[in-house]
Image (cartoon, grey):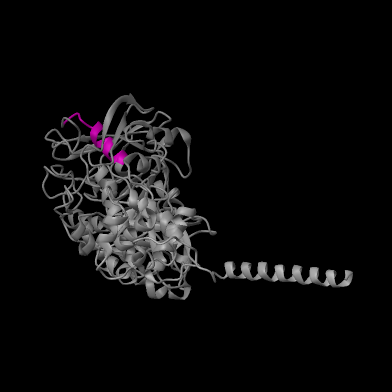
Amino acid sequence: MKRRGMLAGIVAVLAAGAVVGAGGAAWKFHLFGRYYPPTPYDDLLKQIADREPAAVFGHAALAAMPGANAASLARALRGRATLSELAPRDPKESRVTEVSGWVVPESVARYAALAAAV
Amino acid sequence: MSSFLDARTLPKDTVLSPDLAIVGGGPAGISLALALADSGLNILLVESGGMTFEEPTQALYRGSESGVPYVALDAGRLRYLGGSTNHWGGWCRPLDEIDFEQRDWVPHSGWPFARKEIEPYFARAQELVEAGPWIYDAADRAASDSGPVITLGEGGVYTSWFQFSKTRNGILPTHFGERYRNELKAAARITPLLNANVTAIRLAHDGGQVDRLEAATLSGNRFTIKPRCVVLAAGAIETARVMLASDDVTSGGVGNGNDLVGRFFADHPIPRNVATLVLFDGRCAPFYANNVTLPNGAILRAVLSPTGAFLKSHGVVGSLTTVENEVKLDSFATAAVETTAEALGVDASQARAFSLGCGMELLPDPERRLTLSGKRDALGMPRLNLNMTIANEDFARFRKTLAELGRQLLAAKSGMLHLTYSTRAEWLKAMDWGNHHLGTTRMHVDPRKGVVDADGKVHGVGNLYVAGSSVFPTYGSSNPTMNLVALTLRLGDHLKKVMA
């Protein structure tokens, strides 16, 4: 009984270690996406590869767009080409803007602002 | 063989009578003397200093400054043989064709001739400054072994190139006095006169000719120079000073009938850390941040420059943007880079960032000017006050060029740009200056708009010329030395004709 208990303990420790290790690896290699609660703008937000830095940058972009909010930004973005289509095209067609000194494609500024606004 | 004369040893009241007196032994004066060495003219090269720096002589430069903070007048130049080449950085680049054009968006612009007028003199000027074979904008290929130029999308900024005056022992570019003293000594008809300060230009009674120059030494000697012809080559500050101070025949000074002498002073602002360049792949060829030496001896450094077409389409003026040091990005900047690179579909995991510096061209401003102050120097000459200006428009125009560079980086998916300054206070706080003195005896065919004509002759005075960057009516963004030497060599050809 005593031996059985000891084995069970070892198995439990190993299992816990495996869970922690797998979790760490998953985190390290981005196997899990970050969780964001659903919004009415997910069709647009899913175009942003990583919403976290986009939101950080987007706060400055949003501040430079007086009166803008998630709804107004979404209205301006929907029905147009996707971010991955617009972003390379914008600078070629002189659609760039400055966000806190950074020269960026207008589409990047708008999508980042949306990420910050939701 | 001639020998150097020391003005302190001249007998009292000596009168020297050369064919040509060149006032100033800097790059213009020395280049002109050497260019005329075989002309048959007897040339007196009048230099205020000796062969080395001496504080009492340097102190003759002292003056005052007002307006925008600027370098002290005795700090940005050197008063001994070789002039300011004794402390120059050796940066050489020809002025661009557009620099010579009359441009609607640049008030007071337009040289009396196109660049092709001085192009024949570039090769010899390049030899004199010892900048190696003429490569410049063909250097993309020449330097390709060192790495690729930064990929930019189509647009108004491109990689342009500086070449450098030969370094000596890895430290110094060509110092004209030290480098050419033997050539000056070997020239039978050139007499370099050291420690000699021209204190006044005395015109004939009708004002139409220089009769004589009055000169003095700090040791108290006074003497006279009576040449057939005079070339002032004392730099944009001292040349203006002696002209303004010589007002016994023409009020306001020699050549100053239209109140232009001393106006339109300019320099190249070089504000620090004007932008941050991010290259997504992290690769920046070494010739952007440092000089590289090619097997043929040419020393190169790449800069980012606006094209002539961009200047025209966007109403900006010249600038040369340099890559300086690698910098670290903060969390906000990292977010900006990640977000933008991901949207562009580019891997930025190896991205590196660099601070950028620049040299800007100023718009001509008649209120940026030298005037005589009430104070006098040790020789009794009036000292100068410089009223320095820089317009918000100067910053705004350069900023447009930076923004275009940012757009082109994005268009090429090669990187992105952060502009550091947006307010005048921020720009001024970062300000430094190139110590390139320009414009105070500007060149124009119309005496109402310029002090000297297209040959460098002072309007209205038959035998008085000016050599050096003081005659530049607009300034370009290139460093002036090689260009002013080329322009001076052109003046040499003119003098050979008119003085034969």
- Look at the image and tell me in which quarter the C terminus of chain A lies: bottom left
User: Which residue is at a point 59% across and 67% down the rendered structure image?
Assistant: A28
Q: Nearer the viewer, residue B96 or B307?
A: B307
Q: Is residue B239 one of those drawn in magenta?
A: yes
Residue B187, percent across and down?
A: 38, 56
Q: Is residue A57 magenta?
A: no
Q: Is residue A59 visible?
A: yes
Most extreme residue toward the front is: A1
Residue B315 place in picture, x, y as percent: 20, 55
Q: Residue at x 22, y 42 (%)?
A: B365
Q: Position of residue B431 (x, y in %)?
A: 38, 43
Q: Seen in the image, is B350 located left or right of residue B467?
A: right
Q: Determine which quarter of the picture holds residue B464.
A: top left
Residue A63 picture location, percent across and down = 33, 48
Q: Which residues are magenta?
A: B237-249
The residue at the far right in this view is A2
In the image, B368 versus B447, the foreground residue is B368
